[in-house]
Image: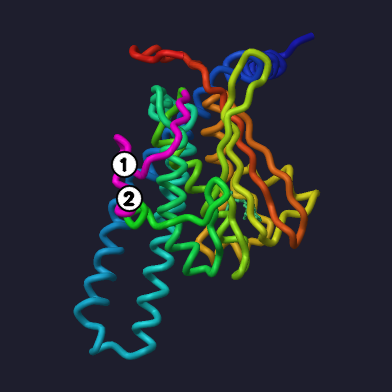
Amino acid sequence: VLTATGLTFLAVAAGAGYFLAGRAMVPIKEAFQRQKAFVADASHELRTPLSVIQSSIEVVEAEEADRLSLFSQQVLADLRDEVGRMTRLISDLLTLARADTEAGAMKFASMDMAAIVAQVVRRFRPAAEKAGIQLMLWGSPVQDEREYAAMNDTTDETGGPAHIPMMLWGDKERLTQLLYILLDNAIKYTPEGGQVQVNLVAQKQGIQERALLTVKDSGIGIAPEQQAHVFERFYRVDKARSRESGGTGLGLAIAHWIVTAHQGTIGLESTLNEGTTFQVCLPMGKHGKEKPTGFDV
Ligand code: ADP
């Protein structure tokens, strides 16, 4: 015999079942999208106040420096570093939140990968020099971008020094970002006196041609059990070391996203205390949904 209470209970239970089994599944997908949009919006909104704080600190540092105690100067310098780190973190979060949305879509075009490699590597020369690291490109020590251009009359259309072009189908800005991440890490995790070597070669794989980029360092290395995790968001082998050198733990997650979007692969080989080599393999032929004109492979 069903009492009124029993009926109500059944109705509620059925309602809950419907909600859990049927209706809730659709909103979960929506909730993920909304959460992503929230992270993207929040990151975007946080950038403005942070840049205001940054410039305020710089103004005080520039105009009040001689009136401030050593202690206050140190506090300001620490503040500036932390704001810088937070700005990087927010910009990385924004990149990842946009990664699988339209705003993160790659702008594919025919581009010269060798030009990007040469340009980015030369930009890192001052940082490498400061860290006491020898930077090598295509097997020779790297010269400063401007010095090199001045020595060589021949410059290419990007304004950079001449090189052997390697055309591929890619997003110039994102591949530049990929190189920044890999070079920044190689220098960060290599002690003074070490070496970082960058190379780019074309390889045939069946009928396909691919570009193989390697960034090899003689640094601290990554233990075998950690190697599979370094592409995860916020994964850091040594949090203190990463933090100290301004890391966000998001660089390699972004690198992985960029390479995957180019239908390529990224991997690493590493030996503790000997060094790490990151290898990026990119297809050179046209791929992806976009079909801009003027590309001939
Ligand atoms: P981070 O901002 O901390 O450098 P990444 O996502 O770029 O974050 O890298 C994740 C972690 O992988 C780093 O914290 C570091 O422990 C390790 N790692 C990355 N590149 C190297 C490298 N070239 N040599 C040694 N360890 C590395």
Task: Name the residue that disc number 1 marks.
Answer: 155
In the rendered image, residue 150 lying in the magenta stretch gets the answer yes
Res 149 label: 2
How many numbered badges does the structure rendering display?
2
The residue lying at 47 percent from left, 29 percent from top is: 166
The magenta segment is 149-168
Q: Which part of the image, by quadrant, shows the N terminus?
A: top right
> What amino acid is found at the position of numbered circle 1 in the picture?
Thr
Question: Is the C-beta of the residue carrying label 2 under 8 Å from the nearest atom of ligand 1?
Answer: no
Q: Is residue 206 visible?
A: yes
Query: x%, y% of residue 290?
Result: 41, 15
What percent of the width, then of the height, locates residue 259? Answer: 55, 32
Q: Amino acid at mark 2?
A: Ala
The residues tagged by marks 1 and 2 sit, at their Cα atoms, a distance apart of 7 Å
Pick whichever, 148 or 239, lies toward us.
Answer: 148
Where disc 2 sits, the SS reads helix
The vertical placement of 5 against 135, above or below, is above
Cβ atoms at labels 1 and 2 below 8 Å apart: yes
Residue sitting farthest toward the top: 1
Q: Position of residue 199 (x, y in %)?
A: 57, 43
Judged left or right of residue 38, residue 155 is left
